[in-house]
Image (cartoon, rainbow, N blue to C red):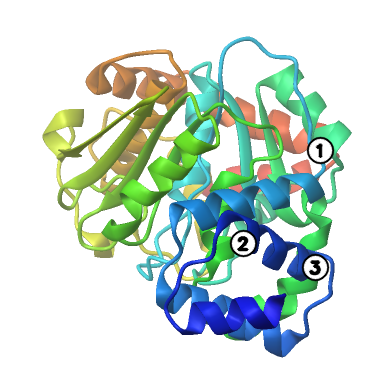
Amino acid sequence: MIRDSIAKVVSGANLTPREARAAMLELLLGAATEAQIGAFLTALSMKRETVEELAAFALVMKEFCHIIRPNVKGRMVDTCGTGGDGIKTFNVSTVAALVAAGAGVTIAKHGNRSVTSNSGSADVLEQLGLNLSQGPAEVQKAIESIGIGFMFAPQFHPAMRAVLKTRQEIGVRTVFNLLGPLVNPANAQAHLLGVAERAWVMPLAMTLMTLGCEDAMVVYGIGGLDEISLFGKTVVARVTGTSLTQHELSPKDFALESVKPSQLLVTDPRQSARLAITLLNSNPRVQEPRMGVTLANAAAAILVGGLGDDLEYCVELAAESIASGAAYGKLRALVELSGGNVSVLDELERSHA
């Protein structure tokens, strides 16, 4: 079946949901060779994946996933994005998730190591002392007890090992970058999902709707950022149940100042970890480029989490989360509960001080 699928996709034709399901099954069951995996992923990317294909792929991945069902009140929110924007910023969505958690949003963060950026969410959290080897039961306990948990993709999607080597060798965006935010193991009901290309804003929002998402903001920062941008406008597709709308946001919608892309860059996970500590222990009222971007994205996570319906108000909630120490408290609790290395945080704190 995979050879037939490769031929069809190479010709520029779309797969039916049944064909997409069969192809993904072969990939995850290890029935496809590395050459076939590479050809299929590359051809799909060149053709551009459809909503129907993405939804079918995601459903198959969920069948192979270790699903958890945290017993929590309200919506769980994921801030996992597609990555691949090429700008090499600090881990905005990860820091924003901690800030939103400090504001009272339940965070079920899905993520992985970097394939296309300088620092993935797993990379920076490991640098902050998190134990990435936690199993599903431990992560579920974290979500229930402290309001935030990190689901390291390889621990929850063991079948992905069949395609890992090929993905790493290709080194560019594949369908799995698009699928990561769609296959949250906790079945998060709300998403702040950043995409690296404007063309993916509506398709990803439509796929979330197809998969039953309650509330989401799929965002693309004009200029190439897979986060909410403050150096220009941000294209947003908003999902609320069965409703889907599209609009643009600018820094003034958050009552925040504009920034330059060069002010957000990091070179590696260690630098991103140090920056995370700095941001979580700084005065959020002082206008600083990286703080502004953190507040904007945390505000969006708070909004889809149902704790506010106005972005300026949600920015204030995010700022209070940092100022009160709640956001940093979530990070320490997350590392401690994971059985991670808290001394790493202590060292980073001393360095910051």
Read off the residue under disc 2: 20
Q: Nearer the viewer, residue 172 or 207?
A: 207
Q: In 3D space, how far apart are the residues under numbered discs 1 and 2 (Cα atoms)?
A: 37 Å
Counting from the top left corner in percent of width and height, residue 341 is at 80, 46
Residue 227 visible (yes or no): no
Counting from the top left corner in percent of width and height, residue 339 is at 86, 39
**47, above or below 16, in the image:** below
Counting from the top left corner in percent of width and height, residue 217 is at 37, 35
Q: Amino acid at mark 3?
A: Arg
Read off the residue under disc 3: 161
* Few, some or many residues within 10 Å of mark 3 (<14, 14–19, 20+): some
Q: Secondary structure at mark 1?
A: loop
Counting from the top left corner in percent of width and height, residue 91 is at 48, 53
**Residue at the extreme left of the image, as rendered:** 252
**310, above or below 222, in the image:** above
Q: Secondary structure at mark 3?
A: helix
What residue sits 79% from the left and 28% below the top?
Answer: 140
